[in-house]
Amino acid sequence: MWLLLAFISALLLGFYDVFKKQSLKENAVIPVLFLNTLFSSLIFVPFIILSASGQEWISKTILYIPVEGWEVHKYVMLKSVIVLSSWIFGYFGMKHLPITIVGPINATRPVMVLVGAMLMFGERLNLYQWVGVLLAVASFFMLSRSGKKEGIDFKHNKWIFFIVMAAVLGAISGLYDKFLMQRFNPMLVQSWYNIYQLLMMGVILMLLWWPKRKETTPFRWHWSIVLISIFLSAADFVYFYALSYNDSMISIVSMIRRGSVIVSFLFGAMLFREKNLKSKAIDLILVLIGMIFLYLGSK
């Protein structure tokens, strides 16, 4: 079951990336990210209120959010700091790079998760799973070659550095998620980490962006900003429940979720009209074959 949930999460993440790219097009990054955290928080506030009010019916559903103290919330707050740091790097990188470059780079994130999972949780991969991981690594090096055709030097482009940093922090977040899901209620983690992010982004918005808003890229409202929050919240909801299964493997779940690159790549070709699709398609095919091997190795 956790494997199926991971694939559903990957599909939802793909649409999340597309709407994120659309929202950031010629737009100010910080207010878009702030609104993302705002709308994501608003999705969960009703469930927090209903759960805290003692409504018996909600306590019997997966939407129930238990009331916990600082001993639990401090772990959730740390999750918020890690994720928000990853998002800040990722949003700026996404704005300045083609989505057909960003997607495959993010697809290599599970390699870092794999190393961490083996060291921290004692996870071990079989032959099929190792083949899938090695194909993902190969796709990253091929992608750097594709990027040079668009004048993107992986070694000296700061936006590539931003995406790589987002991937590293995302990998740390993934490993931390496994730790959290073994101990705490999934809805508790997802709802409150969004609210903590909203508070942090509110401070960043008022201190860093608002005073200089007239000197930087102006903010423009776009309907896709709301869809960022909807698809991300749905993807994370499914993802957290996948990790709550005792036999779930974070190294495999993380790799499958990177299959979202399929959706973002297709929209990058059709909606954003990006270049050098033929060479990037080869990189994508490697990722897809890697997904197949991971699936076969996890049956």
Image (spheres, rainbow, N blue to C red):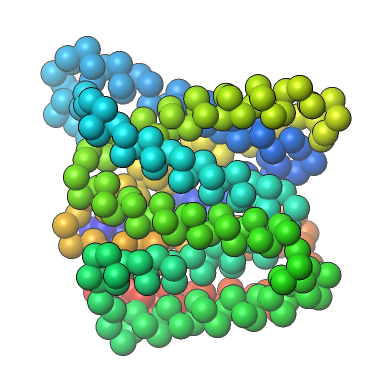
Please name the residue shown 43% across and 27% down the image: 195
Pick the quarter of the image with the C terminus: bottom left
Q: Quadrant of residue 20?
A: top right
Q: Which residue is at 22% across, 38% downward? A: 185
Pick the front one: 140 or 85 = 85
Q: Is residue 132 above or below residue 251?
A: below
Q: Is residue 88 above or below residue 64?
A: below
Image location of residue 29, percent across then percent down: 69, 38
Q: Is residue 234 left or right of residue 280?
A: left
Residue at 65% from the left image edge and 56% from the top image edge: 162
Image-based side of 235 in relation to 34, left or right = left
Which quadrant holds residue 4? bottom left
The answer to whether one can see residue 289 in this image is no
- Expressed as whole percent of the image width and height from the top left, the position of residue 159 reads 71, 57
Point out residue 109 in the picture as x, y percentages from the top left corner.
Answer: 49, 65
At 76% across and 37% down in the image, what residue appears?
Answer: 27
Q: Quadrant of residue 76?
A: top left
Please say whether residue 120 is visible from this viewpoint.
yes
Question: Residue most toward the top?
Answer: 53
Q: Is residue 192 above or below residue 79?
A: above
Whole-percent x and y of residue 241? 27, 47
Residue 1 in the figure: left or right of residue 41: left
The foreground one among 143 and 212 is 212
